[in-house]
Each structure stands twice: as structure tokens, then as C-alpha cells.
Image (cartoon, grey):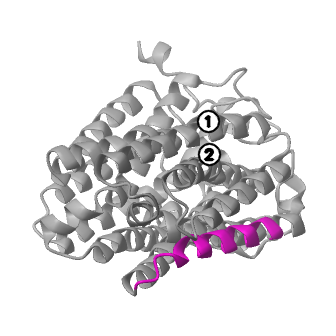
Amino acid sequence: MEGVSRPDLSSPTNAHASRPTAAAPARPNYAALFVLATCSFIYVTAEVLPVGLLPEISSGLHVSEAQVGLLLTSYAGVAALTTIPMTALTMRFPRHRLLAATMVVFVVAQLLAAFSPSLTVLSLARVFSAIAHGVFWAIVAPIATRLAPPGQGGKATGVVFTGSALAMVLGAPLATLVGQATSWRTAVVCVSGVGALSLICILVVVPHMAVLPRDAGVTLKGQLAAAGRQIRSRATLPGCLITLTAVIGQFAAYTYIAPLVRRDGGLDGRSLAVLLLGFGIAGVLGNVIASRFVDRRPDLLMITIFAVMAVSMGVLVGKPGVVVTVIAVLFWGLSSSPMSLSLQAAVLRRAPLSQDAAASVQVVAFQIGIGTGALLGDRLYGHGYLYLLPLLGAVLTATAMVLVFRAKETFPRHPVAHVEAMH
């Protein structure tokens, strides 16, 4: 039965699925892509869970809301520091087994977080989750491309990243509602349970994926060197710089969206949960739209995303009232959700022969952006400058848009194999 339900990608033909010149699946493996989307859903839900439950965690652990907000900073910092070395250490692990291992660590870490007696222990639990998080996001897009035909890697990645958008639709709002109705600990236990179900689905549905021949003999030193080349390469560096700039702006504001919309529109409690639900629904719609263009016009798509983000956050600088606040937040969700999909697809397109190394570098840039943004948000919010958070977000995303104009070659319409050879 296993041979029927789990096609073997370890054969010589299929093992090269992510290489431009090798045989690839005739059609996307949507069952496996759906499982990957489920995993991305639960990872993002866990990462941003403190955003909607700032008051509950703060009250439960007797710490300030600003301190709880720093959970995103520490999480992102650990992921940024560990992604490249952990990805390098695990290069020779079969991809399906490594994927399952990240979920095992995730589930255990969430259970530890749920029973944390203090903020310190909660932070430690999120350290373990962050380590698994970095590896997961470094390998998930390359795995997705191996599950799709040539030229549909962006589409396959879009399916996976829809899970992260759905985390904003269902994960974050449901976690917020459960946490408010019971306790934040119950919400974390529920996250752990969904993670356990995702692990079972990985074991049952995701096909066996042997290490590609080009990676089989790679040493830790060799993989770190490859990551270093990607950091210095014109194929990856501009995308990482754009990622860093935009994500700092996004998370400086988004981390403190609860007090921000409370100030602007008086939205709190259940109304906050409903608004987060709307943010997520808009994000899913944004991902669906972006998936149609990410393989055809990635440059125009990226410019549009940053323009809408900048305008949406800019509107929130003042106190626009309930209606305008809701509209701005919905457009913010519509544009910000496909940002990570588009940036990741661009990096993989520019480095088709070193996707794990390129993806790990991009994940590091993303996590540094999250951590830095959350930290800046904490500093400004903690000193009474909440109104500056959307302004900072608008300025940085507008800057990212300008960088895209100046580096359109970073968003090619097709994989560019010769770029890597040049560097």
C-alpha cells in the first residue's frame, strides 16, 4: 500500500525533480502540497499567537504587554541565528524525514510552552520551536518545487504559502478566541494538537524524497560556504535586502496591531478577533491573486504588494476612526500575506541549483526582519510612540518598493540557472 499512496521520489529519475534539466512530475502533487500548507498554517499560527493574546499572556504571567511582544523578537532572532547552520547540518537527511522531524520538535515545544510557569520558560520553549521553524521554512519551498512540473514552482509554493495566509484567517483568530474564552494555555495546547495531526499527515501522504545527488556528498563546511556565496551573490543579495526592509516595516506595526486598532477604532476583545479574521481572509484572497502572477509578472506583483502595504499602513498613522481603520487593515492583510510567497519564489527562481542554501539565507533575512521590527515596535510602543509604528511600516515598505524598481532583475519570470554559474 505504501508504494501506491506514497510515490517514491528517491528514484534516479525523480530525485532530480528540482533541477531544471531533469524529469519532473507531470502534474502537481496536491495532496502533499496540502499537507505542507497545513504545516505552514500551524507554524505561522504558533509564531504570531502572542499578537492576539498579548493581554491574556501578560496578565497570566504578570509581565507587561511590551515584554510579551518581545516573544516575537526572540523567536525570530533564534530562527535567524540557527537556520543556516541547521540547514547545513541536515543537508543529507531525506527531505520527508527532515520535514517530519521539524514537526516533532514543534509539537514538543508547544506542549512545553503551554505549561510554562514563567515568561522565561515560555521563551525557552519558543526557542526550540524557532529552531524547527527556520529549518522548515528553508526546506518547504524547495520540497514544493519537487512536487510540481517545471515552470509551476511558484504556483506550488503558492499553495503551500496559502497555509500561512489561512493562519491569519483561522489560526490567529481562533487562537485568540479560544484564549479569551478559556486561557492562552488552552490555545497553545490546541496548536500543539494540530501540529501532531500535521505530523501524522506527513508520515502518510508526503512522498519519500531522497537527497539529491548534488547534495549527497555536501559537508557542513561546504553547505556553509554555499550559503556564504548566496549571501554575497547578486542572485540573492538584492532579494534579501528587499525582504529585510519590508519585513522590518511589516512587523514593527503588525506585532502591536492589537493596541493600534484599539487606539484608532476602539476595537478590542472579540472585535479584535473578528478584525484579525478579516485580515486573514483578505490575506488568503491576496495569495490566490498573487499565485496567478508570481510565475509571470513577479516584478509588477512585488511593486503592487509594497505600494498597497505602504498606503494601508500610512492611513493608520492618524486616528482615522472605526470604518477607515477596518478598511485599511483589510487592505493591509490583502497585500502583506503574499509578500513572503513572492519574495521566496523570487529567490528560488534566481538560484535553481542551490535552492536550500538560497532559501535558508532568505529565511534568515525574513527572521531578522521580524525580530528587528518587533524590537523597534517594542521600543516605540514602550515609550508611548504607538502612532509611529504604522508610519515606520509605511516608510520601509515604500523603500522596499523603490528597491524593487532598481533591481527588477531580482524578480525574473523564469529560473536563471546561469546566474549561479557566474557567481
333 and 86: which one is in front?
Answer: 333
Q: Residue at x 51, y 46 (%)?
A: 279
Q: Residue at x 52, y 23 (%)?
A: 31
- Amino acid found under the numbered disc labelled 2: Leu
Point out residue 323 in the picture as x, y percentages from the top left corner. 53, 49
Mark 2 crowdedness (10 Å alpha carbons): few <14, some 14-19, many ≥20: many
Q: Taking the image as drawn, is residue 227 in sight?
A: no
Q: Residue at x 24, y 76 (%)?
A: 64
391 and 15: which one is in front?
Answer: 391
Q: CA distance from mark 1 to mark 2?
A: 7 Å
Does residue 234 lie above or below 285 as drawn?
below
* Residue on which the image places disc 2: 334
Q: Secondary structure at mark 1?
A: helix
> Within the image, what quadrant is residue 306 found in?
bottom right
> Within the image, what quadrant is residue 11 found in?
top right
Q: Secondary structure at mark 2?
A: helix
Which contiguous range is marked in magenta?
A: 384-402
Point out residue 412 in the picture as x, y percentages from the top left corner. 86, 52
The reply to whether the magenta stretch includes residue 387 is yes
* Residue on which the image places disc 1: 285
Does residue 216 lie above or below 125 as drawn?
above
